[in-house]
Amino acid sequence: MKIFALAAALMAAAPLTASANTVTATVYHPDFNGGPNYCDGTTYEHWGISAASSWLPCHSKVRVHHRGRVLSVYIKDRCASCDIDLSAGAAYKLGVPIDGIADVQISY
């Protein structure tokens, strides 16, 4: 358990360098609404603006680009094998299908 906590702390502290990547975006399942976010323990709001990632550091701010729309989101949670998992609110603002997946560009 201590090793997991240490690894999480190191990942949260890792600095992001400016970069842009095309990744696959998915959308959180609504069953997670009201549950705690891994990174900070706050309550996940399905129609709020947030995201999860398996590789971006907790609390990092990323800009998500999709079909001419741009939205800044904070990484508040972890997902097992996703590039970026958007809240329904973030997906809606970006035009990403709520029940599907889409290729998006992220910059940070």
Image (cartoon, rainbow, N blue to C red):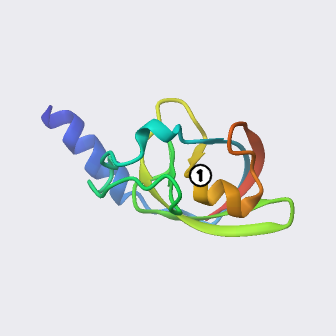
Residue at the image position 13 percent from the left and 36 percent from the top: 2
Q: How many marks?
A: 1
Extreme right residue here?
Answer: 67
Q: Residues within 10 Å of mark 1 (few under 14, many from 20)?
A: many
**Relative to the observer, which residue lies in front, 66 or 90?**
90
Residue 47 is left or right of residue 102, and the answer is left
**Image coordinates for residue 100, horizontal then vertical, percent:** 72, 36
Residue 102 is left or right of residue 51, and the answer is right
Residue at the image position 61 percent from the left and 40 percent from the top: 83
Residue 76 to residue 29: above or below: below
**Image coordinates for residue 9, horizontal then vertical, percent:** 26, 51
Amino acid type at circle 1 is Ala
**Image coordinates for residue 40, horizontal then vertical, percent:** 29, 57
Asked which quadrant contains residue 15, the reply is bottom left
Name the quarter where the C terminus is drawn: bottom right
Task: Please say whether residue 24 is visible from this viewpoint.
Answer: yes
Q: Dot 1 lies on which element?
A: helix
Extreme left residue here?
Answer: 2
Name the quarter where the N terminus is drawn: top left
Residue 52 to residue 95: above or below: above
Residue 89 to residue 82: above or below: below
Residue at the image position 36 percent from the left and 49 percent from the top: 11
Residue 68 is left or right of residue 91, and the answer is right
| Residue bearing the label numbered 1 | 88
Task: Please say whether residue 54 is visible from this viewpoint.
Answer: no
Asked which quadrant contains residue 64, the reply is bottom right
**Image coordinates for residue 107, horizontal then vertical, percent:** 67, 63
Residue 38 to residue 16: above or below: above
Residue 92 is left or right of residue 58, and the answer is right
